[in-house]
Amino acid sequence: MVKNLKHKEQKTEIVVQGIPTSPGIAIGPVFIYSEPTYAPELRIVSRKRVAYEIERFEKAIEQSREYLARIFQETEKNYGKEFSEVIQTQISILEDKIFLNEVRQTIEEKHFDAAYATFKIFRKKKEHFLQLSDEYFRDRAFDIQNLKRLILKNMLGSFQDIKLRKSSIVAAEDLSPTDTIRFHHKNILGFCTNFGGKNTHTAIIARSLGVPAVVGTEVITNAVKPGEMVIVDGNEGIVVVNPGEATIEKYRRKQKAFLIVEKDLLKLAEMPAQTLDGKHIEVHANIEFVEELDQVKKTGAEGIGLYRTEGLFLGENGLPSEDEQTRNYLKIAETIRPNRVVVRTLDVGGDKILPDLVSIPERNPFLGWRAIRFCLDHREIFIPQLKAILRANIYENLSILLPMVSSLEEIYQFRKVFEEVKKHLKQEGKTYNPEIKIGTMIEIPAAALLAESFAKEVDFFSIGTNDLTQYTLAVDRANERISHLFNHFHPALLQLIKKVIDVGNTFNIPVSMCGEMAGDPVAVPMLIGMGLRNFSVVHKVVPEIKNVIRHLSTRQCEQLYQQIQSVNTARKVQEYCETFYGALFGENQTKSTK
Ligand code: PEP
Ligand code: MG
């Protein structure tokens, strides 16, 4: 929905409605972000630098060849010869000495840098093929185009730095988690996008960074010009373009009020999360980046209930080595000890694509080659990660969490890899601690239904409601068109959650919840009523969730859950929860400051 208002100064104030995904108010100039197009500018280098530029070109060619060889094998295995031939054609273009020599010669003679020389020669070749009447050659133009992109990507890095010279609000058609990570700590005031849903990883990262965000506006990039003033209201899901003075004033007041509430809650952070009837509820923090640790320490979190390690792999330096990972996990273990840190193994796939390993785009990436499935097929990535976790576990406060497990076989396969990992470490003479708890995410309905069997194989469960909601309700968490259907109050989801909590109690293994539902203050009383005693939430909301808990009695929460069992629509469940919450904190309060 878009509303226009004219101001005295003739700038049109435009109000765009989207989906609120990260709370807070941001006010500032807009930066419109689009994917890199790899169109390098002309750069002439000195004579001395020519050899270096040729070397850069050779290296990028080599990396591209290796990448294509890997993709060729995968394509042949999964799709057969007919498809892999396309890749073979591209490989043979990279073996065409005469063609590649043209680039080298251009660098030598014209002193163009490697990127511009590649761009120029490949473009010339593509245009040449496009002019030929034979269809075969016109198809080759597309191969050349793809190769140009691949080589430039390898040369310039998948993540050319995005330089925001001044603090800005980023507007984009869509932002992948990788894009969001690239903006990390770089003068970002807020995010607004055309696409995306509330529980995408991008939205979660924005919440982790404490940056207000609105997604799914459909039109924001068309409604705004670079540098124009924008307000992002992450509480209401509103973006105001070219706000008038009165509007800016109104939102400054809102911003101030929001920050005061946040500060007040932070003052209570160290108070325990104990219910009125004396039950202690554990509240841990979810983190994405090591840089969040300082903040986490201030929130009164009892530990890290979920460390999403993807940030390490999607960052600008590509795949981290075993040693780099060891240092990273050790830093977290050291900072948080004696409290616990749950390290989740790599959960790529879905909306989190590893740029260096993207192969063939998947038709249904969320149902595809994700998380444990990907890691079991990519042991060269999985094994170093597991080794690093064991090496970093010197304070015995780390545990391993496996994402997206859907069958017992995957647990068995993991155990085999794990034995191999320990063997490697022993052979290499590295110090490590084999005593470590292993848990699984419960985020696929199959895992919830098989909770009894899983409980015999692992030490703890962590319920991932973001994916469990997505897979139970068949609602893509990243699709803004159906985001109204993504509802963690759905009775079907509640049945699965209850089952997992009960199994945990029967088998005496800890069950925590680390999906976004755990950080929804309105859902917390019902979850406690269901028997949940361990929450892991974005660090920003730890003080709020602890404060909610201090206002609850477990008996009242159990009564609430009893009432809920008599209704069978998400709307009714939500109404019960909202009424309960409203009675405690007032109907309109989004943050509990009582
Ligand atoms: C979840 O699915 O609820 C979860 C915590 O994992 P992620 O959001 O990283 O997929
Ligand atoms: Mg998940």
Image (cartoon, rainbow, N blue to C red):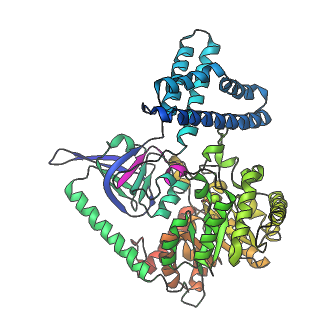
| Residue range (magenta) | 166-180
Give whichever of 15, 435 is nearer the camera.
Answer: 435
What residue appears at the point 69 percent right and 54 percent down from the top-left corner?
371
Residue 171 in the magenta stretch? The answer is: yes
- Counting from the top left corner in percent of width and height, residue 553 is at 55, 86
- Counting from the top left corner in percent of width and height, residue 369 is at 70, 47
* Residue 250 location, quadrant: bottom left
* Residue 11 location, quadrant: top left
Residue 177 in the magenta stretch? The answer is: yes
Give whichever of 286, 321 is nearer the camera.
Answer: 321
What residue appears at the point 45 percent right and 43 percent down from the top-left corner?
173
56 vs 82, left or right, is left
* Residue 12 location, quadrant: top left
Give whichever of 567, 424 is nearer the camera.
Answer: 424
Q: Residue furthest front?
A: 48
198 vs 43, left or right, is right
Number of numbered tags placed on the structure image = 0
Give whichever of 400, 449 is nearer the camera.
Answer: 400
Is residue 462 something one can see in this rendering?
yes
Q: Residue furthest top?
A: 133
- Counting from the top left corner in percent of width and height, residue 155 is at 55, 38
- Counting from the top left corner in percent of width and height, residue 487 is at 56, 59
In the rendered image of this protein, does residue 124 appear above or below residue 150? above
Q: Ligand 1 appears in which quadrant?
A: bottom right
Is residue 580 something one can see in this rendering?
no
